[in-house]
Image: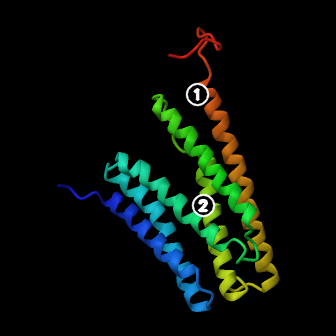
């Protein structure tokens, strides 16, 4: 049987997420440094599995489900664990992030159950990248009280900017999915919007 490299990379990202969660719970600088390293590697695999899936023509149902699931686990889990422990991430922010994921997952699940293709939007992909940058920066700042080669004041400003930009993109991407869903579920010209569905 031919080895499915993208799926193995995706499964590896889930294992890296577990390691990241364990490490990020510690307060010492060295452990947080390695937590950030693991997180960066895990984020890199998010791009690798998609690249190899297209390049090797190994796109599978498992991959389509597991890839976004792993992304949500490591990002949402990281924000949950850093909430209140980071200068920049508060519990209400985590509620916004997780609520968005529940909403979009519900919409996508219903759409695909109706046979409607409901793939990822560019807004969702950009949102995910900014969330990863914001979380990685927050973990690094927790360890070193600054970002690499930058003074503390500028580092704080950049971390706050990244986190709030991630929140804005989280809400905006949810809106794009809602608009897309309204169009996808809208009755066709010849269909009575008030008629019961069979």
Say which element carries label 1. helix
- Which is nearer the N-term, disc 2 or disc 1? 2
Q: Residue at x 54, y 45 (%)?
A: 120
In the rendered structure, the answer to whether residue 6 lies left or right of residue 132 reads: left
Residue 129 badge? 2
Q: CA distance from mark 2 to mark 1?
A: 26 Å
In the rendered structure, the answer to whether residue 36 lies left or right of residue 4 reads: right
Q: Residue at x 68, y 53 (%)?
A: 170
How busy is the neighbourhood of tag 1: few (under 14 within 10 Å), some, or many (20 plus)?
Answer: some
What is the residue that sits farthest to the left in this orientation? 1
Where does the image place residue 47, in percent across and percent down from the top left?
47, 60
How busy is the neighbourhood of tag 2: few (under 14 within 10 Å), some, or many (20 plus)?
Answer: some
* Residue designated by label 1: 184
Q: Residue at x 40, y 61 (%)?
A: 10
Say which element carries label 2. helix
Q: Residue at x 77, y 67 (%)?
A: 161
Q: Quadrant of residue 168?
A: bottom right
Where does the image place residue 144, in percent across and percent down from the top left?
68, 88
Residue 127 badge? none
Coloring scheme of the render? Answer: rainbow
Q: Quadrant of residue 90?
A: bottom right
In the rendered structure, the answer to whether residue 150 lies left or right of residue 36 reads: right
Where does the image place residue 174, in percent across and percent down from the top left?
67, 45
Q: Tell us which disc is closer to us: 2 or 1.
A: 1
């Amino acid at each position: 049987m031919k080895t499915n490299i993208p799926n193995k990379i995706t499964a590896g990202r889930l294992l890296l997420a577990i390691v990241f969660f364990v490490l990020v719970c510690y307060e010492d600088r060295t452990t947080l440094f390695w937590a950030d390293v693991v997180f960066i590697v895990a984020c890199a695999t998010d791009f690798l599995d998609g690249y190899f899936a297209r390049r090797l023509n190994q796109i599978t149902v498992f991959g389509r489900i597991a890839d976004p699931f792993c992304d949500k686990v490591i990002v949402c889990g990281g924000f949950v664990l850093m909430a209140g422990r980071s200068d920049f991430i508060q519990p209400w922010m985590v509620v916004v992030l997780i609520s968005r994921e529940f909403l979009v997952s519900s919409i996508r699940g219903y759409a695909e159950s109706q046979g409607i293709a409901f793939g990822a939007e560019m807004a969702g992909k950009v949102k995910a990248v900014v969330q990863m940058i914001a979380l990685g920066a927050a973990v690094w700042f927790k360890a070193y009280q600054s970002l690499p080669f930058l003074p503390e004041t500028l580092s704080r400003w950049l971390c706050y900017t990244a986190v709030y930009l991630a929140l804005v993109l989280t809400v905006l991407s949810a809106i794009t999915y809602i608009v897309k869903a309204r169009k996808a579920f809208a009755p066709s010209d010849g269909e009575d919007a008030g008629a019961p569905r069979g």
